[in-house]
Amino acid sequence: MTVHTKGDGLPGPDETRPHLGIERAAPRNEQMAADKVECNACPVLCQISVGRAGACDRYANEQGVLVRVDPVVWLRRAPNHAPLQQALMARAEVGPQALPEAGSADDPDYFVTGIGSSTTYPDYKPAPFIVASKVRGVDMVTVVTEGIFSYCSFKVKIDTDRFLGPEQSAVRYRGEVIGHVTTAEYGSQMLSLGGVHHLTGGSKKEGRLTLEAMHLLGNLQPVEVDIEQGAKVRLQAGQAPVVNGVAESRMRVGCGSAAVGIFAQQWLGLCDEVVVVDDHITGVLSEHQAGRCLNMKPTGVGIRGRKSTPGRYFQVASPGDGWGGTDISDPLSILEPFDPEVAWPGLRLLMTSTTGEHSAWFVLDDQLMPQPAPMPEAVRQVVERIGENCEPSMVSVLFLAGAGGSLRAGVTDNPIRLTQAIKRALVNVTIGGASAYVWPGGGITLMADVTRMPQGSFGTVPTPAIVAPIEFSMKLSDYQALGGHMGFVRTLEDSLRHGAWHNDGAPQKMVWQAPEGVQPWPLHQPPMLG
C-alpha cells in the first residue's frame, strides 16, 4: 500500500478531514535541503532525498512527498467463514479500482492488521487506524498500529534430543552473540534470542546482527547459528531443525522411562529385557514399575549411571548426538556385566532410543555376554511404533515483546486504563491478527507464534529495533470508558477505501486470505463474544 504522510504525520490545514478535528501544518527542519523530506516514523529522523528510501526501507521520498513503501495487510475470511489459520496464505493485491466489500454490516469479512499501518511515533499521535465495526450485534472498535520494539526477543523451541550446547551458552550469528541457550523442555531444546541488551547494550555490530537475525526469524526465513561448546543449528520457523548439517525428523515420544511405560505391554512375551537409552532418564523394563506390574522376571542387567527409582537411571552417558541424545554409538557401553545369579543364557535383550531411530537386538551367550542377533519381526514392529508416535521435529518461534508508551498513547490519553482493561479481559490483543498471550503482572508483555502471522509481518528500524504489528479489539463503549481517541474512530468501509487517517487518496492494499485452520477470527476472540 502506498501511504503518504506529511512531516509529523498529521494532516495539514488543506487536507484535514472534518471529523478529525485536527488542523496542524507539518513542521520543517530549516537546515534540511529543500529537496529532502524528514521522516519521523522512528527516532532516527531520516532526511530522505528524492527517489531514495530511508534507512529502514519502509519510507521513501516520492517527488517531495513522504511515501509509505510497504502495503497495509488486511485479513480476509474465507467465503465459508472458516477460522483463520496463519502463515502460508494465498495473497492478492487489491487496488483502489477493485476495492472489496467489507462484508455484512453485522459481521465484517475484513480485519485491518498493523502490518504496514505505520507507527504512532511521536507519542502524541493517535493510532493510524481506529476502526469501528459491528460483530454479532456488538459495537466494536479495533485500534491498529505498528510498534517499534527494542524490548523484544524470540523464544525458539527446537524439537530434538541432540545436544545443542550447555545451558547459558552463548548463541552466535555471523560471529556476534545474539542470545543464549536456556532450560531444556520435554523433548525440546530452547533458545532465547534478541532482547534489548543485545540490540542496544553492546557494540553497533552486535545490535545490527541481532536485529538482522530477529528480522529473518520473524519473517519465517532461515538463520544459522553457532552455539558455544555445542552445535551449528539452522533455524526456520515451522521447519525441521538442521543440527550439524543433519535434518532432524522425530521428536521423541517421551523419556526412556515414559517409553518403557507406554510400550511395556507390547514388549511382554517378545523380550526378556528392554533398555531405552536416553540422555535424561534411561528406562529398564524389568525393574520399572510397568515391568513389575506385568510380573516380568528380573534379568540381572546392570546400568552405568545414577539410579533414581527402580528402572529409571540418570546420567548414563554424556549429552551428544548419538543414541537418545547421548554421546554413545555402542549401546552396550552403558551396561555393566549381567548378574550371573540372575541372568541366563538365551536372555533376549532389546536396546532402543527414545525415537526408535536407533535399535539393536541381542541374545546372551553361555558367558552371559550380549551377542548381536537378527531382530524378530514382531519386536521390530514395536520399535517402528515408537517412531510412529514421535511427532515431526520442528522449530517453533515465539515473538515476545513489551508494549510501551507510544503504543498505549496511540490508543488512549490515559495508558494505564488500557493495561487495566487488557488484564480484565475487556481488550483482545492480536499481533498481525494472530492470537497473543498477555503475561500477567505489570505492563503489556505479550507473546505470539510467528507462523500464525502473515509472512513478512516484521520490519526494522536502525535504532536498532523490530517493527511489529499490534491490534487492540474491544467494545466501543469500553474504548470510550478508557479514554480512547473517539474523534478518530472510522468505519471499516472508510478505512478500507482511504487507509490510515493521515494518508492521502485510496492507497493500494495487500489482502491475505487464510484457508481453514486453527486460529479464530480476530474479532471473535474477545471473551464477551464467545
Image (tube, helix red, strand yellow):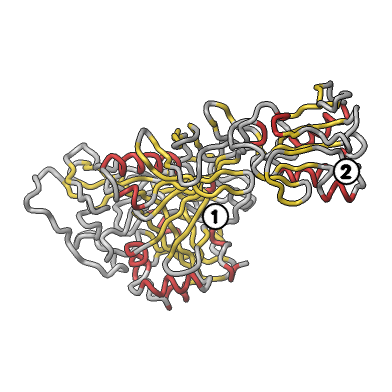
Q: Residue furthest bottom?
A: 481
Quadrant where the image shows the N terminus? top left
In this view of the protein, which residue sits in the foreground, 104 or 146?
146
Give the labeled residue for mark 2: 265
- Residue under the image location 88 percent in, 42 percent down: 298
Q: Depth-wise, is mark 1 or mark 2 nearer the camera?
A: 2
Give SS at disc 1. loop
The numbered mark at residue 367 is none
Give SS at disc 2. helix
Amino acid residing under circle 1? Asp
Mark pair 1, 2: CA separation: 52 Å
| Image quarter of residue 322 | top right
In this view of the protein, which residue sits in the foreground, 296 or 15?
296
Give the labeled residue for mark 1: 109
The crowd level at tag 1 (other Cα within 10 Å; few <14, some 14-19, many 20+) is some
- Is 325 displayed left or right of 425 in the figure? right
- Is 249 displayed left or right of 125 in the figure? right
Please tell me whether residue 530 is drawn above or below residue 251 in the rendered image: below
Q: Residue furthest front?
A: 341
Q: Residue furthest left?
A: 31
The crowd level at tag 2 (other Cα within 10 Å; few <14, some 14-19, many 20+) is some
| Image quarter of residue 188 | top right
- Residue under the image location 40 percent in, 43 percent down: 214
Mark before the other along the chain sequence, 1 or 2: 1
In the rendering, at what x and y percent does residue 514 appear? 57, 45
Q: How many numbered discs, if any?
A: 2
- Is 401 displayed left or right of 275 in the figure? left
Q: Kindly check if marks 1 and 2 are in contact, taking CB atoms under 8 A apart as contact.
A: no
